[in-house]
Image: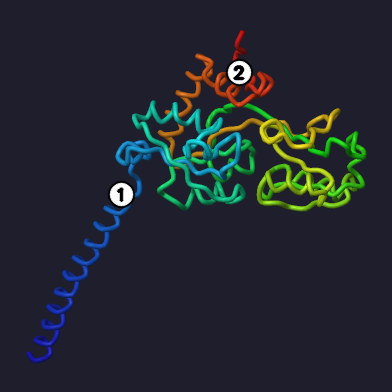
């Protein structure tokens, strides 16, 4: 009888413990589901709730920058996103700034950011990290040299020290040229203005950068520099807005608005506002008469 009593007591204790464990386990599952539901809230809902579209940029003119006169976000990509924000039901946008090389990584880890846009060229490598909208416009690389320079043809770069922006596809191209002996050396800078300044100060012989940036800044800043011509671009590309892979609904809504802006020629008007010709239009946009 004593043995049976002990067995019964052990069974009772085990049963009580199981009930306790079951409650704890169930509580953990419930908490996890609640947390998951919060994290998985649709991005469009989040934008509407906070009443602002938050854009990650590298503060790079003419794509996305703060206008020194108004202290407001402006630029090609910003003007396009202002129209998209209206379509999403919000009137306010804000910019968060990080170095260009960190744009896509920061987009993925910072939930307060909705999209990234800073003249980002769509590449297969970048598409592994994020999704891109339909192309907004296109561009290629340009070589910038002093107006008076020994570099008059592409072949003259073989003895030149060339500057390129960290994280850009043009940095990769410049490094490739170095390995092939097409340039003497490559120096990496964090921004395009730094490259232009280094050329002006004769710290480097030339710079490779986005053709749009080069054309805009040479005109805007009246620098004693020029775009190397003739030169056949090797990296023609198309620019889009970066969106997290999880934000499928947001991507679809943005693409619908982009399609409308192509049809009503809003994108063309924005490009012209920043002094760019119709040569930068994406292939599926009809030119203005």
Q: Residues within 10 Å of mark 1 (few under 14, many from 20)?
A: few
Place of residue 77 in the rendered image (x, y in percent of width and height, measured from the top left): 54, 32
**Image point (24%, 65%), residue name:** 25
Label number found at residue 284: 2
Place of residue 218 in the rendered image (x, y in percent of width and height, measured from the top left): 72, 34
Q: In this view, which residue lies farthest toward the bottom? A: 2
Question: Looking at the image, can residue 203 be seen?
Answer: yes
**Alpha carbon separation for disc pair 2 and 1:** 39 Å
- Location of mark 1 (residue): 38
Describe residue 180's horizontal placement relative to residue 217 as left or right: right
Place of residue 92 in the rendered image (x, y in percent of width and height, measured from the top left): 38, 35
Q: What element carries label 1?
A: helix
**Image point (51%, 41%), residue name:** 116
Q: In this view, which residue lies farthest toward the left? A: 1
Describe residue 138's horizontal placement relative to residue 265 as left or right: right
Please identify the quadrant where the N terminus is shown: bottom left
Q: Is residue 179 above or below residue 289?
A: below
Q: In this view, does 223 lie above or below 20?
A: above
Who comes first in sequence, dot 2 or dot 1? 1
Place of residue 51 in the rendered image (x, y in percent of width and height, measured from the top left): 33, 37
Label number found at residue 286: none
Q: In this view, does 278 lie above or below 140?
A: above
**Image point (68%, 50%), residue name:** 166
Describe residue 175's horizontal placement relative to residue 139 as left or right: right
Question: Looking at the image, can residue 171 be seen?
Answer: no
């Amino acid at each position: 009888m004593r043995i049976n009593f002990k067995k019964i007591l052990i069974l009772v204790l085990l049963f009580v413990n199981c009930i306790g464990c079951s409650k704890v386990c169930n509580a953990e599952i419930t908490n996890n589901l609640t947390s998951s539901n919060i994290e998985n809230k649709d991005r469009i809902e989040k934008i509407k709730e906070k009443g602002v579209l938050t854009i990650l940029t590298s503060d790079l003119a003419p794509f996305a920058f703060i206008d020194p006169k108004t202290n407001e976000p402006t630029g090609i990509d910003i003007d396009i996103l202002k129209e998209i924000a209206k379509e999403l039901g919000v009137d306010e946008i804000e910019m968060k700034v990080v170095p260009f090389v960190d744009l896509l990584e920061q987009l993925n880890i910072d939930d307060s950011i909705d999209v990234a846009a800073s003249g980002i060229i769509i590449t297969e490598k970048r598409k592994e990290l994020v999704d891109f909208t339909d192309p907004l416009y296109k561009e290629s690389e340009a070589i910038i040299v002093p107006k008076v320079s020994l570099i008059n043809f592409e072949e003259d770069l073989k003895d030149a020290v060339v500057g390129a922006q960290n994280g850009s596809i043009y940095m990769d191209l410049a490094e490739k040229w170095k390995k092939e002996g097409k340039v003497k050396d490559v120096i990496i800078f964090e921004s395009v203005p730094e490259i232009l300044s280094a050329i002006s100060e004769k710290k480097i012989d030339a710079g490779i950068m986005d053709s749009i940036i080069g054309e805009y800044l040479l005109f805007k800043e009246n620098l004693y520099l020029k775009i190397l011509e003739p030169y056949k671009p090797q990296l023609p590309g198309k620019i889009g807005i970066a969106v997290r892979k999880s934000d499928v609904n947001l991507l679809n809504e943005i693409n619908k608005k982009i399609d409308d802006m192509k049809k009503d020629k809003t994108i063309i008007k924005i490009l012209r506002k920043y002094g760019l010709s119709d040569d930068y239009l994406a292939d599926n946009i009809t030119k203005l008469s």
